[in-house]
Image: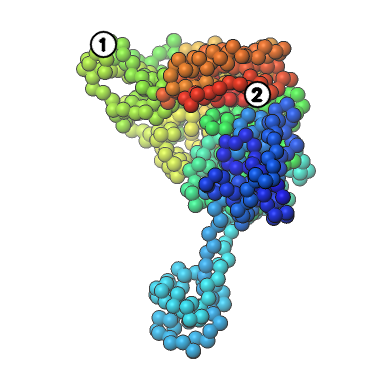
Amino acid sequence: MRVSVLLPLPFPSALDYLAPEGAVMPGDLVSVPLGRREVTGCVWDMQSDVPADFAPVVPKEVSLARLKPLLGRLDIPAVPSDLRRFIDWLAAYTLTPPGLVLAMAIRARHTQPARVQLGWIRGDIDPASVRLTEARQRVLNVVSDRPLSTATLTENTGVSSAVLRGLAAVGVLQEVPLAVEPLFAPPDAAFHPPVLSEEQREAATHLAEGVRAHRFGVTLLEGVTGSGKTEVYFEAIAACLAAGRQCLVLLPEIALSTQWTDRFARRFGVQPALWHSELGGRKRRETWHAIARGEAAVVVGARSALFLPFPALGLIIVDEEHESAFKQEEGVTYHGRDMAIVRARLSDVPAILVSATPSLETLTNVENGRYEHVTLHRRHGSATLPDVCLVDMRRAPPDRGQFLSPQLIEAVRATFDRQEQAMLFLNRRGYAPLTLCRACGHRMECPNCSAWLVEHRARQILTCHHCGHHEALPETCPACEAESSLVAIGPGIERVHEEARLHFPEARILVMASDTLGSPSATAEAVRRISDHEIDLVIGTQIVAKGWHFPDLTLVGVVDADLGLGGGDLRAAERTVQLLHQVSGRAGRADKPGTVLLQSYLGDHPVMKALVSNDYQAFMEQESAQRRPGFWPPYGRLAALIVSADSADSADRLAAQLGAKAPDLPGTQVLGPAPAPLAVLRGRHRRRLLLRTRRNVAVQPILRQWLEGIKLTTHQRIDIDIDPISFL
């Protein structure tokens, strides 16, 4: 019979093959010929869940005589039906070849059969009938009818594996598969139930009832920082476990997993399964198979965990749902939060979105009745929200060449005098964002990108944070050759660290950034040192704004609260208030009250007013009022076309061709073409066009028709970003 097989390759649809009737079923992973190669694919059945507005065109059927037969079925779990539907849906929505989406679910290293471990038992031959040496006798004294591994036998008897193989050759020993211990122990929902406040208990009960109903629905769990949102949604996980189903928890950053998994283990008695890019190849394969067999009850991971083959999914949780890190910008572009909701709907399971500062998209869905809303208004226990104060840098500037105001310096000293901890936050890595020549004005720029090189003084290099290019810090200006003329402009956290050393020479200081914490284990060690009060002052980028709980940390100083407000980004103000609200929430999370100092030159900005008044709701209402009249998201739809080529002329020609064919339809508008803010990235010249439509207009058919007939050279490319987050 004819079977469709989707291959993890950029084909527009599945390919047809021949198979004996009943030999394979949809979802089975199979080996098929492709030219001279043998590749792994998935037996496919096009689903009806894809909306007609953006469903792909079905190719013409090929005659049976031209089809090649399958080579065989792989002996590994099938791809579940809900995951297949999700792959089809995401591919159609993002205008991506479905095989590229499938590739995220069945990478080659995942689909290798699990290695069978072998052990030894007594064979059928009587040992008295063969020659027994002293070494052989020692083995027979230990071996029994219960399989023992080679390592166990050789360790207990002192013999080599050659002795075991010799006994097997004469039939005295027999090699059999070992019983493999499950990779993940089952969590115990009743292991250590928390003591919840009345407000928390009501929220937890509501979430757990939604899980027990086992039907799709989305609930926003909103709570101030430190209100115990994690403990509350743990009770939803407990209800999912009690129902014998699996739970997926998405976190925006790998670094968040350190404290999260510790808290999970204290509540449920075991560690959850982890899924992120830092896992080694063997661990990823074993974890993938354990999930596919239903042996991993709770999986916590990055956005890529959405493509895991859960056979019994019962709940999806998206923690810190507002985080832009959930958007995948490279390859298949999708938003992890939005696609988590799609997967929950296709699996008919509840989804919980969690945040202290929900996105405007989520709040709008709550307002329109699409999502339920559960709110925690108070911090847990005796903790109170920190006092947030503005430091007007126009009236109280720092000393020349420095970046910490006298008010902030004095507050840090007072914190140390009380034997408490402080944090300085600046969302900028390195020593300085710009290096220029004071003799001729030359600026050190990346040769591959339209971006300045960032100085990392500790390593004596200049580096590009976009493409990774780096070069040694020169002693003379490359343009005018003036000696000792290069100066650092602006602060990065290395420069703040240098200044902090000057003001607080006795303090124990730790710098936390993605380039100083190179692994989850390094992050875990940093968190331990802070929690054990081995550190007095933490200096960090946005990694410190995540959900850390440090009981002795009572002061947070934001070095440049205005950073991120410029650039014309649609969501600049929303992102800034979310980030600064999150980092402010690190202060005063236990019995000791907290204080936050925001250094700003824009004290009248709505973001600063919202942070000082702690009125996030009023800020978001104002943000909503600004976007609604122009039909900007979430009140309209956006899709970006990013043109790139190896020369500026080639990029301009293709962008102009797209501009000339731009759709002119009711309720739509095309902005551009125009150079991208990063007009050159990794050596490629970039132009952007932005399609904006009203909310009730689907962008997929418009884009498909727009791009029809556009011919690309080998050096040109068009990337499509549905619902763009970044506008660089």
Q: Which residue is mark 2?
A: 704
Residue 319 appears in the picture as rendered: no
Of 471 and 542, the residue lying toward us: 471
Q: Position of residue 643 (x, y in %)?
A: 52, 20
Q: Quadrant of residue 670?
A: top right
Residue 141 appears in the picture as rendered: yes
Q: Position of residue 9 (x, y in %)?
A: 57, 39
Q: Residue furthest left?
A: 483
Q: Residue at x 60, y 28 (%)?
A: 322
Q: Which residue is mark 1?
A: 439
Q: 10 Å neighbourhood of mark 2: few (<14), some, or many (≥20)?
A: few
Which disc is residue 147 wearing?
A: none
Amino acid of disc 2: Arg
Of 710 and 315, the residue lying toward us: 710
Q: 10 Å neighbourhood of mark 1: few (<14), some, or many (≥20)?
A: some
Amino acid of disc 1: Ala
Q: Position of residue 657 (x, y in %)?
A: 56, 14
Of 145 and 540, the residue lying toward us: 145
Give the structural element (helix, strand or loop) at label 2.
Answer: helix
Q: Quadrant of residue 500?
A: top left
Q: Residue furthest front?
A: 65
Alpha carbon distance from label 1 to label 2: 53 Å
Q: Residue at x 51, y 78 (%)?
A: 173
Q: Position of residue 414 (x, y in %)?
A: 42, 27
